[in-house]
Image (tube, coloured by chain):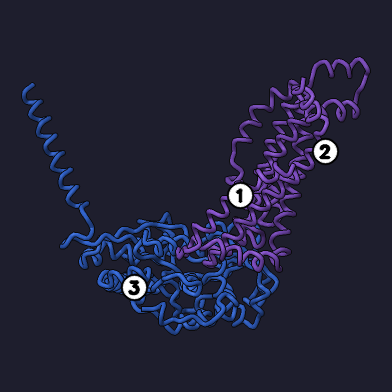
Chain colours: A purple, B blue
Amino acid sequence: MIKRILLAVTMPVVLLAVWWFASAGSTDFYFPPLRRILETFPETWFGPRMVDDVLPSLARLAIGYAAALCVGIALGMLIGANRTLRAVVEPLLEFLRAVPPPVLVPILMLMAGIGDLMKVLVIVSGCLWPILLNTVEGVRAVDEVLTDTCRSYRIRGRLRVWHLMVRSASPQIVAGARQALSIGIILMVISEMFAASSGIGFTVIQFKDGFRIPQMWSGVLLLGLLGVLLALLFRLVERRVLGWYHGIRAVQKER
Amino acid sequence: MRRHLAAILLATSLLATACGAGDGADGGSAAPGEPDKVTVGVIPILDVAPIYLGVEKGFFAELDIDLELTQAEGGAAIVPAVVSEQYQFGFSNVVSLLLAQSEGLPVKVVSNGNNSTGVDGEDFAGLMVKADSPIRSAKDLEGRTVAANTLQNIVDTSVRASVREAGGDPSKVKFVALPFPEQPAALANGQVDAVFVVEPFQQAVLAEGGRKIASSYVDAADDLTVAVYFTSRQLQAENPDLVRRFTEAMQESLSYADSHPDEARQIIGTYTEIAPEVIEKLTLPKWPSDINRDSLETMADLAVEDGLLKETPDLNALLP
């Protein structure tokens, strides 16, 4: 366990050290020494900005991500379980998925204004697709023996959806959700670059326009750290939700 | 057949000479007797019409400057390019340059850019609201949202000046960053309560029945110098002669454009996508050849008052 943690932190530590020493004597205005960036970090983010910018960003991400999960899984179940429906909508889904969400921003702005709703919708518009498409795949690939068993035992309705479909599809759903999380963080930042007045992305742009470059870099670092934290959090949740699946996999490997 | 061959040979040799001539013209920029190759970063807006006109009129060529104009989205992208000497000169609003200087960037102003018309209600930019808006003056903007193309530049500083002049508290105005082209629609949809737009977007808002409640550039300072041309301190130190020639050609271009507004209108059509019938209606900025230093002192004081700058900047170091 300790060895794994050590291995995981080696690379970041090495990279930070390289950055620290390579930039130590930097006089380039746009690439300040890492020391200065780290010095500005606490005063920049651990003040009123935590409440004014970081928390609103995270709240919009949480709402957008949760909405994408609910809609994606629900629609995915429906589409995955119904062969005709799947045949009809699959080309459309592939098309919608291929549209990069940033180009939707001006359209969403016309529809939903420039407030929080627009920013949440931008996040949803990107996070939805990996979850939805993975759910469809997961439901389609439910083990036929299990399906037949359910039928023989006359397991129907909510029980069937929860214990057969959701359970069987959950490894795929989780894979989609993990992909959606990283897309969500990117879109959280992008949505704040348009018509914003708060948020981490907005603040980073403001630092750039105000020529406060160490502060700008500290924002980039903060975004990276948030990404790592959210990924760790995700792994914790995944371990709970998919414990049974990883167990089966481990047993199969041993065999 | 032989005739054909001769024709082909002739064509090839012509091509070769053409290429040869081309090579000669592209030769080293620093060679004696050759013009200096200079790249200037500009924003494709009305304000830079004089430099386009100056190139067309040959004011730069006369002083041995071979000028290439490169368009950038906004001033914030031009400053890094000038400081890293990718561009030799750039165009920026004065507040951004004051900020850049206060953060330690080696920038140096070399020429005036453009000024407000100085006439209240008839400037090339304005603070505007919807036709049926309850907002009557800049004071009513307290607690309201105003769109500005970028924050922390001359736009929000000037709008705050308007609010202050009307007797309001500028710290109660909320700003949202929105590019100029999107502002008319945002105003019409009620997403923002007011916009600060420059031409041609001012015409777009007027066409939808919008009302101008303040000419913020006029409120901020008399005959305000809105933007200037600048270079890096390195270039200023290494090649003062080039900087001097650029300034001279620029001054000639400015006074020519200021006294020939019809030609300025014509050249605007060549580097923007503005429709000819709209160009006729535009209110042009003023293009005096000298920087209005008093107005910049006022701007610096306003930037300090708004908390944009921590201390009064050293204008002597920034201005020529």
Distance from disc 2 to disc 3, alpha carbons, whole Å, reads 72 Å
Disc 3: which residue? B258
Q: Secondary structure at mark 3?
A: helix
B305 over B199 or under it: above or below: below
Disc 2: which residue? A240
Q: Mark 1 against mark 2, which lies toward the viewer?
A: 1
The residue that appears at 43% across and 76% down in the rendered structure is: B225
Q: Position of residue B299 (x, y in %)?
A: 50, 79
Q: Secondary structure at mark 2?
A: helix
The residue that appears at 92% across and 22% down in the rendered structure is: A155
B204 over B4 or under it: above or below: below
Q: Position of residue B230 (x, y in %)?
A: 38, 70
Question: Closer to the camera, A210 or B7?
Answer: A210
Disc 1: which residue? A12
Distance from disc 1 to disc 3, alpha carbons, whole Å, reads 58 Å
| Three-letter code for the amino acid on which mark 2 is drawn | Arg
How packed mark 1 is, by other alpha carbons closer than 10 Å (few <14, some 14-19, many 20 or more), is few
How packed mark 3 is, by other alpha carbons closer than 10 Å (few <14, some 14-19, many 20 or more), is many
